[in-house]
Image (cartoon, rainbow, N blue to C red):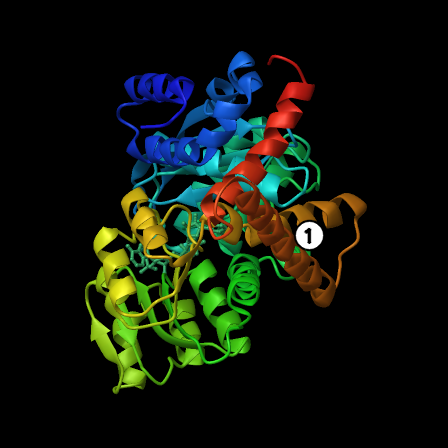
């Protein structure tokens, strides 16, 4: 499978030890594939058991969260924090509240986060956490009680210089606010222990837009370098209409692109003349599902109830921004058949391994999430800096820093890709660039 025998043996062992964790194994497999050449040519990686150490989380915390709903019923959920790697800085990564959350998903996310954070150039280690709690259909009071009880356990494991969680699927300003309030009350201090905070209590401007905007800044670099082109008049399709998808759509439009289709869990809407993003934004702010309701405002648009079918809409650029494995091989084939030339991941691991390979073989420009969606954690890092110096930066200052960081991440991935493989292979480039920083820090700090 890999050219390196060391990686083959290690992957077999990893499969045996984690056979019920498909998402985690998928992330490790993709990483090993990208690292194969480096591992074959650097014996120190095996000698110092770097791969064994780097794929194993430093710590996994699993806890019970008990909370009472509006009817007085007592509910029990599982909470987690996966503290993956702190070689280059405090653990950093989001919290996800979704019924699908389990150890496999959080391990894959924490693993990816380690390299993504390294790519930003900021001193941030990798982590991820969350709960199988489903925020859908819950009242604000229920959300508050859940968040407070979640923090009642999590607080003892985090800190501004230890582990700094943020949001992810199902966790936005509201949830971060409730958790931060509880943390402050227990610990009796105001520190940058969470990012993605509200602007009234230490949040950073541009944080809510950062992942989506950063994705478009990254795509702009790809268009410029590989095609001497830009977003102007490009037809863009985007899956997911949450924090990442919505802001990617707004930035793509601002840069001259035309967003012609977007999806949520209930389907997708398509309008060849471009979606009215003001309506999409207004609808998603009211309730999560917007696709069907969009037709009430724009009857000429087309609605389809299967979101995966959106990959068949003819487009130039596709931005998967919803969730893991949402872009399967059939979707990749449809994209290629219908003229798409660039796919950039806003979500974490939205493209299956098979689909990624298919797109690369078809010579589609492809940006992996660990590079292209790093804008969120980058601005989280900037939020930590602002909190530490007790001084906020302006919108323009943060936005400009974000643009520089995304362009720098592209440059790092491109440079490593050119050095080790084809200059278009940003999967290999991003993995190597992220790995090298963590690897060197681990070597410098001894056997731990
Ligand atoms: P949100 O919960 O804000 O939004 C998720 C969106 O995806 C919703 O519109 C949801 O629809 C939709 N969705 C879920 N499943 C599907 C599906 N199978 N097909 C189509 N749409 C679907 O999450 P975020 O925007 O924060 O995160 C999205 C992705 O980006 C995740 O992979 C996350 O890990 C990643 N990411 C997020 C960052 C951030 O800063 N928030 C940073 C880096 C990566 P509905 O509302 O109907 O459920």
Within 10 Å of disc 1 (Cα), the crowding (few <14, some 14-19, many 20+) is: many
Q: Position of residue 84 (x, y in %)?
A: 51, 28
Give SS at disc 1.
loop
Q: Position of residue 200 (x, y in %)?
A: 67, 58
Q: Could you tell me if residue 299 is visible in this image?
A: yes
302 or 147: which is nearer to us? Answer: 302
Quarter of the rendering occupied by the N terminus: top left
Residue at left 38%, top 71%? 316
Residue at left 60%, top 57%? 207
Quarter of the rendering occupied by the C terminus: top right
User: In the visual, does 447 lie left or right of 387?
Assistant: left
388 or 398: which is nearer to us? Answer: 398
Q: Position of residue 420 (x, y in %)?
A: 53, 39
Against 391, residue 49 (above or below) is above
Q: Is mark 1 within 8 Å of ligand 1?
A: no
Q: Could you tell me if residue 182 is visible in this image?
A: no
Which image quarter has ligand 1? bottom left
How many marks the image carries: the answer is 1
Q: Position of residue 402 (x, y in %)?
A: 65, 58
Residue at left 26%, top 26%? 20
- Residue 106 appears in which quarter of the rendering? top left
Q: Which residue is mark 1?
A: 202
31 or 417: which is nearer to us? Answer: 417
User: In the visual, does 185 lie left or right of 267?
Assistant: right
208 or 288: which is nearer to us? Answer: 208
User: In the visual, does 266 lie left or right of 44?
Assistant: left
Against 369, residue 87 (above or below) is above
- Residue 5 appears in which quarter of the rendering? top left
């Amino acid at each position: 499978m890999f050219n390196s025998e060391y990686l083959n043996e290690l992957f077999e062992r990893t499969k045996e030890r984690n056979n019920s964790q498909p998402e985690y194994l998928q992330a490790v497999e993709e990483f090993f594939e990208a690292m194969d050449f480096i591992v074959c040519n650097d014996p120190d990686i095996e000698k110092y058991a770097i791969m064994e150490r780097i794929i194993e989380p430093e710590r996994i915390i699993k806890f019970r969260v008990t909370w009472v709903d509006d009817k007085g019923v007592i509910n029990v959920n599982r909470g987690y924090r996966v503290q993956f790697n702190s070689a280059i800085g405090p653990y950093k990564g989001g919290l996800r509240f979704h019924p699908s959350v389990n150890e496999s998903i959080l391990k894959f996310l924490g693993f990816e986060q380690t390299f993504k954070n390294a790519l930003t150039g900021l001193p941030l280690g990798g982590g991820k956490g969350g709960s199988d709690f489903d925020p859908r259909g819950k009242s604000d009071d229920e959300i508050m009680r859940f968040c407070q009880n979640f923090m009642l356990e999590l607080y003892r494991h985090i800190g501004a210089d230890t582990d700094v969680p943020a949001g992810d699927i199902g966790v936005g300003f509201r949830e971060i606010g409730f958790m931060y309030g509880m943390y402050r009350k227990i610990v009796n201090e105001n520190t940058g222990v969470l990012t993605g905070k509200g602007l009234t209590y230490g949040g950073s401007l541009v944080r809510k837009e950062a992942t989506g905007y950063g994705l478009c800044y990254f795509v702009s670099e790809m268009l410029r370098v590989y095609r001497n082109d830009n977003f102007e008049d490009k037809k863009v399709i985007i899956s997911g209409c949450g924090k990442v998808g919505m802001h990617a759509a707004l930035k793509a439009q601002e840069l001259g692109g035309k967003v012609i289709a977007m999806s949520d869990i209930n389907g997708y809407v398509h309008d060849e003349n471009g979606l009215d993003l003001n309506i999409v934004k207004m609808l998603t702010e009211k309730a999560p599902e917007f696709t069907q309701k969009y037709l009430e405002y724009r009857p000429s648009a087309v609605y389809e109830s299967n979101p995966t079918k959106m990959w068949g809409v003819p487009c130039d650029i596709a931005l998967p921004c919803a969730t893991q494995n949402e872009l399967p091989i059939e979707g990749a084939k449809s994209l290629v058949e219908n003229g798409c030339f660039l796919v950039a991941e806003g979500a974490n691991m939205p493209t299956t391994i098979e689909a990624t390979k298919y797109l690369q073989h078809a010579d589609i420009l492809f940006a992996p999430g660990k590079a292209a969606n790093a804008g969120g954690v980058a601005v989280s890092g900037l939020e930590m800096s602002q909190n530490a110096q007790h001084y906020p930066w302006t919108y323009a200052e943060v936005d400009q820093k974000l643009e520089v960081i995304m362009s720098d991440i592209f440059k790092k991935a491109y440079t490593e890709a050119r050095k080790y493989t084809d200059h278009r292979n940003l999967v290999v480039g991003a993995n190597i660039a992220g790995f090298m920083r963590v690897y060197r820090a681990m070597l410098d700090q001894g056997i731990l």
